[in-house]
Amino acid sequence: MKQEYIVIILSALLLLFLIRKEIKRSNRSWLAMRIIMSVLAITSLALLFIPVAFTTTKEKPSSQILVLVTPGAESEPDSFSSYKHITTDQQSSSPDITFIPDLPIYLSKHADGINSIHITGNGIMPYEWEILKEHKINSSYTPPSEPGGIIHADWPRSIARGGQFQVQGVYNNYGGEDLKVVLTGLGTSLDSVNIQKDSSQSFSLACQPSHNGNTIYELQAIRNGRIVSVEKLPVIIHPIGKPRILLLSSSPGFENKFLGTWLYENNYPVAIRNTVSRDKYDHQFLNMKATALNTINASVLETFDLLIADDNALAELSPSAAAALRSQIDKGTGLIIQSDSNRSLSSFSRPFILRKQVIGQTAKRNLSWSGNAPQKNQLSAEDWFAIQPDPVAQQLVTDEHQSVITACRLSGKGKVILNTAGTTYSWVLSGTMGSYSSFWSLLISKAGRTQKKETTWRYSPAFPTVDSEVRLTLEKNNPMPPVIKTTSGDLYTDQTPYLPDTWTGNWWPATPGWQTLSSTDTVSIYVFEDKDWSAAKAKAQISSNIMHAEKQTSAIGTRNKIITETKQVPVWFFYAGLLIACSFLWWERRAAG
């Protein structure tokens, strides 16, 4: 039993005893006063052993303002010059700016004396904004000018060999002279773009890797023949299992002949069936064993991952063959339809709406698609058909008038692509083999059967940096928390609430370069040095601080902070009450004599 309860019980018993004694006294004078003083005496005695506290509130004075200087800070208004300046960046410290090693620790000791903090420069981390909010410190932020250089860049971290590696970004050129941004890899310039002086310009550069493994491309900014900056572009280029392709043609033609040759030269296992006459076919088997193709049925289609056919060949399929193909597409087999008509001939092309293309005065038109330069992809405009835009269809290839030439739709687990560019072999004849390879690599990769990974890895931020926190996320159906093995030791994960297949962990990489993490499988993550992508990091941090400052202002407001304090009643107060009550009872007893 707690001490307070014992004191209360004993005090109550003692008080009842004293009141009973006072009531039974024959002298009834001063009875009420004697009872009151008895109560005061016993209560004061009890409160000597039971602490009594009370709370008070007061407003914090508004004059206590700090200025937090962070890297990238510019000149500040004169209105802030009289306030105390602090910084967590040792290089920014000076006789007028006090260096503090850690902002959260500083606030834990001095928060009660701080009413407001004004932040200059690139800003602070998100968790530091949360600490300011917890301490109810009013915060404001003045962002600096946007940094010069590459302030934004995005590229695929993993691609298949032969696919398009494309990097897109924004460059702030404040140098007063034009410059060139060059994509380089393996010691070779692969693509470039000119950036005008005194401008903020978007750019897009691309190449088509022909090797496997972890690769570091670079973005070089060159002005007057001198390299002014170099940024790394890590990417994992992995080999892909070549899909088994069945090529059906309603009649022999140049398009399928050149396509079959290209597939063979690129090691695709391909079977070709050309219709010679009714129920008579010419068969070719490239990079694979021969198989019976006279009758198309489920057992034949199950051996292929992708079917490329002209719309007329699909229309000539028997109802049972068409049903078998539809079933295989729903299971994941891809279909690429070649169309040279303004109407659908088969049920497979019917979801796409075709229309005649307006030729106008041009004999050729430029095609464009992701990762390739449109000026290099000219095709004849004769007998040109386009696809009507559809919100449920992905546009893969367009011309300079934004007409859709090739589009993709989902069908069950598979994909159906309709292609109206029927003379792509002319690229081979004109020597632009790169355009031909890029075009068909895009279509085959889009239509190919999707291979689902057992574990999906994600990480943030986009630029993992040495000695900075990296948030790892694994999507894995696992009954037990997976353990991630790193070069720094084992990393234990937590299950995400309401997402039983998602596990997260915080990783602090210790060394730069490629790092291999392993759990149920492995993943390679490139860790940047602190100096890498400085402009992009600064831009991202400035944007984050602007957002947090707006939220902080609306959440805390501009009022003075109210401080709640707990104080204990001094014990001398109860000694005085006990002394007064006992003195009266003693005097009354003597006077009654």
Image (cartoon, rainbow, N blue to C red):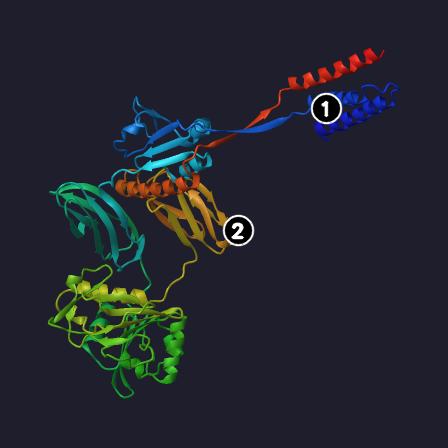
Q: Residues within 10 Å of mark 1 (few under 14, many from 20)?
A: some
Provide the secondary structure element on which disc 2 rests. Answer: loop
Q: Kindly report the distance in space between the C-alpha atoms of the residues bearing marks 2 and 1.
A: 60 Å
Q: Image point 79% across, 25% down: which residue? A: 15
Residue identified by numbered label 2: 480
Q: Which x, y percent locates residue 536? A: 28, 43
23 or 282: which is nearer to us?
Answer: 23
Amino acid found under the numbered disc labelled 1: Thr
Name the spot of residue 157 as percent of width and height, x first: 31, 52
Residue 466: quadrant of the picture: top left
Residue 157 disc label? none
- Callout 2 environment at 10 Å: few (<14), some (14 to 19), or many (20+)? few
Q: Is residue 508 visible?
A: no
Work out whether 422 lies above or below 396. below
Along the viewing direction, whichever of 79 and 97 lies nearer the viewer: 79
Give the residue type at disc 2: Met
Q: Residue at x 30, y 42 (%)?
A: 537
Is residue 178 among what the camera can see? yes
